[in-house]
């Protein structure tokens, strides 16, 4: 035990004396969470639009007023003729043009329908999609107000309600993902680098010649990172609660336990990486390419797994991060407990055991 | 009775990597308190042989006893009784001299009190008072090597393995380093040293020369020179290595 404490003390000296690893450990999580929280967002706010109104009657005025009154859009300019549409898009500031047909009001009363053309700049498909949805929603609500008195014979009125994230805040989606990335990065990359560093410097040999057993060396190397990863998890959760007002509907305790399981999975991966790489550079590249990319692309962090091609969906199942993100979202947003998350938890535990077993086996082979 | 004086006993030790035989049935003994020079060209199999003797590599066949324990069945006992300093530098650059001593003393299970005594004695002996709290990375290579050697002796091992300990060090420091080796040997520690400086080979009590995985010569430097009719160990080495 005394040997172990001495070992861990030495490991902390390494970490705290290396500015680079300190930055990765504590600077990056905070920077990432703030970046994802503030800068990267799917919401639209004060999008500039242009109006081409061929009627200029009461109805169109009311609709235009309603649109400009919302926070989502601000009217950048009024166009005069169709040919202006192309040129205004080319300038790039305006993201959508609303084109009201001639005799809008008259058509609406006489023929029971009239047309607005919603033209969006789809160079950014997500934004274009969101804009056209928002415009539709505003028009629907306008129609509803107008039809309050008159009743139609048949009509279907969908009442949509977004649950768990009613305001569709993208930070709710990013926090679980960022938390996953950071825990993975700190645990897997940092441990693999710190183990290969000893190999590269030749000190690993000295440690293996000492009476310390190989598994003691490895546990001594990873223990500080378990501790630091837990601190990171706490920092991320506190930041998301206090800065982004993210709710934690479920049990904080369960969230903690699940995080520790995921941290251990990542550490096992880190050890595995260190057994197959001879230099710190290799370890870092394998961690970034082999762990970060799949986490970002295939875990459902940014792109929903259900809309991926089937082969990718199958692959996504072997990515521990996918299951951890489901668990974190479940606990934080839905407030569900273990009775709904036991399957994901078991999968994660299974993976942890598998990776630990594999890295122990690999590690032994390396020593022969 | 001679047997009891042998702290290293190696018989027919062999290591194969696939078709390639790195160490080919080597047999030798090392006596207590001896400075044993383990020579050979690069790639002759020295490092592989040492790795088997210190228990971090398994042999393909053969036997080896170190400090009275079988290396492959009682590895833990062997490890407690040996010190090791590798050709790559063996201390942590980002730890101070004192922290390095404390750490290595700690992993060999020395008590806190013992570590303190040892570390004070070592600092005094090497005249390190002024730099004891400096990071090792800031010290010149010669200093590092001397400290690394002292650290390898911290737990009073019966045998210390030195794998090219003086690589890249200036002649004066090499001289001082060898004085430290003599002193340790005088106090009863067996020294097992590899080097490719042939002048250093002259300092050894006995020398073995490895060529292509086999030990081609083993004797005192004096008798080797007579046997090969050579003026210096350098000539002996060249004659052997050229075949």
Image: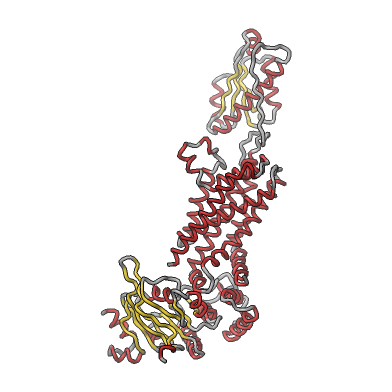
Snapshot quadrant of residue A55:
top right
Residue A138 position, x and y percent, is 66, 24
Please provide percent x and percent y for residue A82: 56, 19
- What colouring style does the render use? secondary structure
Q: Residue furthest right?
A: A149
Total residue callouts: 0
Tell me: residue A4, above or below residue A132: below
Q: Residue at x 55, y 58 (%)?
A: A190
Residue A61 seen in the figure: no
What's the residue at 49%, 61% (across, down)?
A360
Q: Residue at x 69, y 18 (%)?
A: A144
Q: Is residue B146 visible?
A: yes
Q: Residue furthest left?
A: B243
The location of residue A307, given as percent across then percent down, is: 52, 35
Q: Nearer the viewer, residue A60 or A308?
A: A308
Is the residue A237 above or below the residue B225 in the image? above
Instruction: Using the image, determine if residue A207 lies above or below residue B240.
Output: above
Front residue of B125/A311: it is A311
- In the picture provided, is B229 more to the left or to the right than B121? left
Relative placement, left or right, of A204 versus A43 is left
Q: Quadrant of residue A245?
A: top right
Horizontal side of A276 relative to A107 (left or right) equals left
Does residue A195 lie above or below A92 as drawn? below
- Give percent across and percent down for residue A157: 65, 20
Which quadrant holds the C terminus of chain B?
bottom left
Residue toward you, B155 or A43: B155
Image quadrant where one finds the N terminus of chain B: bottom left
Q: Is B164 on the left or on the right of B240, as rendered?
A: right
């Amino acid at each position: 035990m005394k040997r172990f404490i001495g070992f861990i003390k030495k490991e902390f000296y390494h970490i705290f004396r290396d500015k680079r690893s300190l930055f990765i450990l504590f600077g990056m999580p905070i920077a990432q969470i703030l970046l994802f929280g503030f800068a990267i967002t799917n919401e639209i706010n004060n999008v500039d639009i242009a109006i081409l109104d061929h009627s200029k009657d009461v109805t169109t005025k009311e609709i235009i007023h309603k649109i400009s009154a919302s926070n989502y859009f601000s009217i950048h300019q009024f166009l005069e003729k169709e040919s202006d549409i192309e040129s205004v898009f080319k300038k790039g500031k305006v993201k959508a043009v609303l084109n009201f047909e001639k005799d809008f009001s008259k058509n609406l009363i006489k023929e029971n329908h009239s047309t607005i053309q919603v033209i969006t700049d789809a160079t950014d498909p997500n934004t274009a999609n969101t804009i056209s949805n928002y415009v539709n929603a505003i028009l629907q609500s306008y129609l509803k107000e107008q039809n309050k008195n008159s009743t139609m014979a048949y009509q279907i009125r969908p009442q949509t309600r977004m649950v768990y994230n009613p305001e569709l805040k993208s930070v709710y989606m990013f926090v679980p993902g960022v938390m996953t990335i950071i825990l993975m990065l700190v645990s897997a990359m940092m441990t693999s680098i710190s183990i290969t560093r000893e190999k590269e410097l030749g000190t690993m040999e000295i440690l293996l010649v000492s009476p310390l057993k190989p598994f003691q060396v490895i546990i001594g190397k990873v223990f500080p990172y378990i501790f630091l990863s837990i601190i990171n998890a706490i920092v991320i959760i506190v930041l998301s609660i206090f800065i982004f007002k993210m709710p934690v509907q479920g049990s904080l305790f369960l969230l903690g336990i699940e995080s520790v399981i995921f941290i251990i999975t990542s550490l096992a991966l880190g050890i595995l990486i260190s057994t197959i790489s001879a230099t710190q550079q290799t370890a870092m590249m394998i961690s970034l390419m082999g762990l970060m990319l799949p986490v970002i692309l295939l875990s459902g962090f940014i792109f929903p797994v259900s809309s991926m091609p089937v082969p990718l969906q199958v692959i996504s199942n072997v990515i521990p991060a996918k299951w951890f993100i489901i668990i974190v979202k479940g606990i934080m947003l839905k407030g569900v407990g273990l009775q709904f998350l036991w399957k994901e938890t078991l999968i994660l535990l299974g993976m942890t055991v598998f990776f630990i077993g594999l890295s122990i086996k690999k590690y032994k082979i390396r020593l022969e | 009775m001679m047997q009891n004086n042998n702290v290293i006993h190696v018989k027919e030790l062999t290591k194969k990597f696939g078709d390639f035989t790195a160490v080919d049935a080597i047999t030798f003994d090392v006596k207590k308190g001896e400075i044993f020079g383990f020579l050979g060209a690069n790639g002759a199999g020295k490092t592989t042989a040492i790795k088997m003797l210190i228990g971090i590599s398994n042999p393909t066949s053969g036997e080896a006893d170190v400090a009275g324990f079988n290396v492959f069945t009682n590895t833990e006992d062997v490890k407690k009784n040996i010190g090791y300093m590798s050709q790559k530098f063996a201390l942590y650059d980002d730890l101070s001299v004192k922290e390095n001593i404390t750490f290595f003393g700690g992993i060999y299970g020395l008590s806190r009190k013992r570590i303190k005594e040892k570390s004070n004695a070592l600092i005094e002996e090497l005249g390190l008072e002024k730099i004891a709290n400096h990071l090792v990375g800031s010290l010149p290579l010669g200093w590092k090597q001397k400290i690394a050697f002292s650290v390898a002796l911290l737990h009073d091992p019966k045998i210390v393995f030195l794998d090219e300990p003086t690589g890249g060090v200036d002649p004066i420091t090499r001289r001082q380093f060898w004085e430290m080796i003599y002193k340790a040997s005088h106090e009863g520690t067996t020294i097992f040293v590899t080097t490719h400086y042939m002048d250093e080979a002259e300092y050894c009590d006995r020398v073995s020369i490895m060529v292509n995985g086999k030990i081609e010569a083993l004797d005192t430097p004096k008798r080797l020179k007579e046997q090969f009719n050579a003026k210096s160990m350098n000539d002996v080495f060249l004659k052997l290595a050229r075949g």
